[in-house]
Image: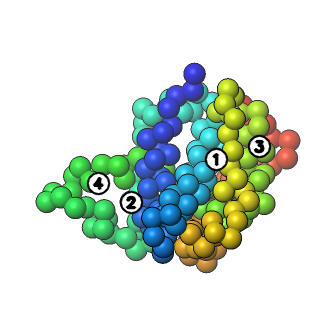
Amino acid sequence: MLADLSPLIAATTQWLTYSYPSGGGALDSALSDVQARQGVTVAAWLRYPTPMDAALVGVAGPGGSARLDWITGADGAAYETGSDGADEYAWRTWVDEVVASWAACLLIDSALATAAVAALADCGHMAGSPVEFRRLVAPDERDRRAAALLRHPDLLAPIADLHRADLMDRLKPGEALTA
């Protein structure tokens, strides 16, 4: 059984959807969240392909959102609703900068997203359950409108460019993910 990456996936997804929110109502917000979650899931599975990788990040922690917040100009105040903000801030410590960067790359480039999903075909994360990433690899017009900021290449470029080279190295033809 693979170590659980769900806290990292949830926090990184939340960071992306807070930083690049949907402009519409509840349905647009849900569609944007699904696209972010699919991008983050693929990125996390690529970044942590083995049970040992996933277990190590679970022990050491992914690093948090501080650098990402600085790059996007967020000071964290938008996330804090309590008097001290400690409880509201805690989820941000589970944001993974590399996963957020890779997810940004996948969200702005459907062809790259398709290649990333294909690279996961033999990965242990995909075993045992049918997983579909349609909203990531083939978003329809409604998906694109709902996640206009989340998929905007110019807006995501500062985040995507942080670790794009590492993602491209991971996706080189002939490079198998170890599972």
In the image, residue 71 sits, relative to residue 4, either above or below, namely: below
In the image, residue 115 sits, relative to residue 148, either above or below, namely: above
Q: Position of residue 118 (x, y in %)?
A: 78, 45
Report the mark closest to the observer, 2 or 3. Answer: 3
Residues at circles 2 and 3 in contact by the CB criterion of under 8 Å: no
Pointer 3: what residue?
119
Q: Earlier in the sequence, mark 4 or mark 2?
A: 2
Q: Position of residue 139 (x, y in %)?
A: 69, 62
Q: Amino acid at mark 1?
A: Val
Q: Secondary structure at mark 3?
A: helix
**Which residue lies at the image location 67% right of the left edge and 26% below the top edge?**
128
User: How far apart are the two marked residues, 1 and 3, measured between alpha carbons?
Assistant: 10 Å
Q: Position of residue 96 (x, y in %)?
A: 48, 50
Numbered mark located on residue 42 in the image:
1
**Which residue lies at the image location 43% right of the left edge and 50% below the top edge?**
11
Residue 168 visible, this orientation: no
Numbered mark located on residue 78 in the image:
none
Q: Earlier in the sequence, mark 1 or mark 4?
A: 1
Residues at circles 2 and 1 in contact by the CB criterion of under 8 Å: no
Q: Earlier in the sequence, mark 1 or mark 3?
A: 1
Residues at circles 4 and 2 in contact by the CB criterion of under 8 Å: no
Pointer 4: what residue?
89
Q: Quadrant of residue 145?
A: bottom right
User: How far apart are the two marked residues, 3 and 4, measured between alpha carbons?
Assistant: 34 Å
Q: Amino acid at mark 2?
A: Ala
User: How far apart are the two marked residues, 1 and 4, measured between alpha carbons?
Assistant: 25 Å
Report the mark closest to the observer, 2 or 1. Answer: 1
In the rendered structure, the answer to whether residue 71 lies left or right of residue 172 reads left
Q: Secondary structure at mark 4?
A: helix
